[in-house]
Image: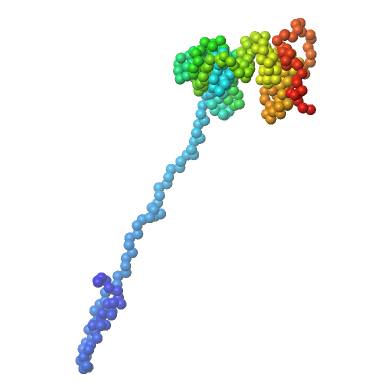
């Protein structure tokens, strides 16, 4: 038992020992002084451990506000697409067009300038054809075909971009063996007042196939349009008209042929003939109730209306060229079955 007994147990023990059991009256004897009762000691509380609240924390140094991440520096980004392919394939009797667009990699107020020390910005772009997977083996280089009084420099960014069309001529394509090839567009400016460096677009592959011996009507039409476009870019207007008219003679309601022929008529200064082509195309759209007519047909129609609205100038020294008139198959009235319903 603990030596430090509670006070009520000590008192009970003393009273029990002091009581007697004899029958006779005991002799009076001096009452012994009671034994001192040890005073119960109050329990000491356990030491209190220091709590985090009791510890005065050290003041933390004031941290500066995080700095904003720096905006990346803009660089030119090269985008391009191959025109004239059918399901990723190109017949080896056709040209290959490459539509190129250069824009800024950052959408911000910052702009960059393509201004080589000599030549124009488009001279710094190379459009190369090589075997698929072997970009170092350059087989052909395209030439730009839509340059018309272009400024020597180009600004990219803040809503501005630069672009153009490059061409691999059909005569050069015909020299290649059937197989898989790739096209890559590169921009390199070593010196000048603006941006300097080298960038390239992602290569795009295609399959070159032998021209079919017995082409379908649609293949014949696409070939005629592609070759007519190549001739027009070389300003051989008569050849372009011949290629289109040969197909229009057998397919006078083909909208793609009619659009190309209307543009050629406008080039020859003959808006009346161009309007005949556009009107025939619209007649088919209406008769067949197309839900989504071609967008470029709207644009072509506006160009024809604008050309027809111009005031007549003094009589030209030479008559309109023969190639500015479409074939009789286009100028002939539409059959009643193809005429638009009133």
Left or right, residue 59 beside residue 178: left
By what rule are the colours in the image chosen?
A: rainbow
Q: Position of residue 209 (x, y in %)?
A: 53, 17
Residue reaching furthest to the top: 317
Residue reaching furthest to the bottom: 24
Closer to the camera, 47 or 317?
A: 317
Closer to the camera, 307 or 51?
A: 307
Residue reaching furthest to the front: 214
Q: Is residue 227 above or below residue 70?
A: above
Q: Position of residue 100 (x, y in %)?
A: 57, 20
> Which residue occupies 40% across, 47% down?
58
Closer to the camera, 311 or 138?
A: 138
> Which residue occupies 63% across, 11% down?
231
Q: Is residue 293 above or below residue 187?
A: below
Q: What is the quadrant of residue 280 in the picture?
A: top right
Left or right, residue 32 beside residue 327: left
Q: Is residue 66 above or below residue 75?
A: below
Q: Is residue 314 visible?
A: yes
Tally the numbered discs.
0
Q: Position of residue 291 (x, y in %)?
A: 69, 30
> Which residue occupies 68% across, 29% down?
292
Q: Quadrant of the N terminus?
A: bottom left
Q: Quadrant of the C terminus?
A: top right
> Which residue occupies 61% across, 13% down?
227
Q: What is the quadrant of residue 340 in the picture?
A: top right
Q: Position of residue 315 (x, y in %)?
A: 79, 8
Closer to the camera, 257 or 99?
A: 257
Q: What is the quadrant of residue 168 in the picture?
A: top right
Q: Is residue 197 visible?
A: no
Left or right, residue 291 beside residue 141: right
Left or right, residue 215 beside residue 23: right
């Amino acid at each position: 038992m603990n030596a430090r007994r509670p006070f009520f147990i000590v008192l009970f023990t003393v009273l029990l020992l002091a009581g007697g059991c004899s029958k006779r009256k005991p002799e009076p004897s001096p009452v012994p002084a009671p034994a001192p009762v040890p005073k119960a000691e109050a329990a000491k509380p356990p030491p209190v451990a220091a709590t985090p609240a009791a510890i005065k924390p050290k003041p933390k140094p004031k941290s500066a506000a995080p700095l904003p991440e720096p905006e990346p520096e803009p660089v030119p980004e090269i985008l391009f697409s191959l025109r004239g392919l059918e399901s990723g394939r190109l017949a080896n009797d056709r040209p290959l067009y490459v539509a190129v667009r250069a824009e800024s990699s950052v959408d911000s107020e910052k702009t960059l300038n393509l201004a080589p020390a000599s030549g124009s910005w488009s001279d710094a772009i190379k459009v190369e054809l090589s075997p698929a997977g072997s970009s170092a083996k350059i087989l052909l280089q395209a030439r730009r075909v839509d340059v018309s009084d272009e400024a020597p420099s180009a600004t990219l960014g803040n809503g501005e971009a630069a672009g153009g069309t490059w061409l691999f001529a059909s005569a050069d394509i015909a020299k290649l063996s059937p197989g898989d090839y790739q096209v890559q567009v590169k921009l390199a400016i070593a010196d000048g007042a603006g941006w300097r460096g080298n960038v390239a677009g992602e290569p795009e592959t295609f399959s070159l196939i032998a021209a079919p011996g017995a082409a379908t009507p649609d293949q014949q039409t696409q070939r005629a349009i592609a070759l007519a476009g190549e001739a027009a870019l070389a300003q051989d207007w008569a050849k372009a008209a011949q290629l289109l008219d040969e197909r229009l003679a057998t397919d006078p309601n083909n909208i793609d042929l009619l659009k190309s022929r209307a543009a050629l008529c406008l080039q020859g200064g003959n808006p009346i003939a161009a309007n005949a082509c556009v009107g025939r195309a619209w007649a088919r759209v209406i008769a067949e109730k197309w839900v989504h007519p071609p967008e470029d047909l709207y644009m072509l129609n506006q160009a024809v209306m604008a050309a027809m609205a111009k005031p007549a100038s003094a009589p030209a020294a030479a008559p309109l060229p023969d190639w500015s008139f479409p074939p009789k198959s286009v100028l002939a009235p539409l059959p009643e079955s193809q005429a638009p319903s009133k």
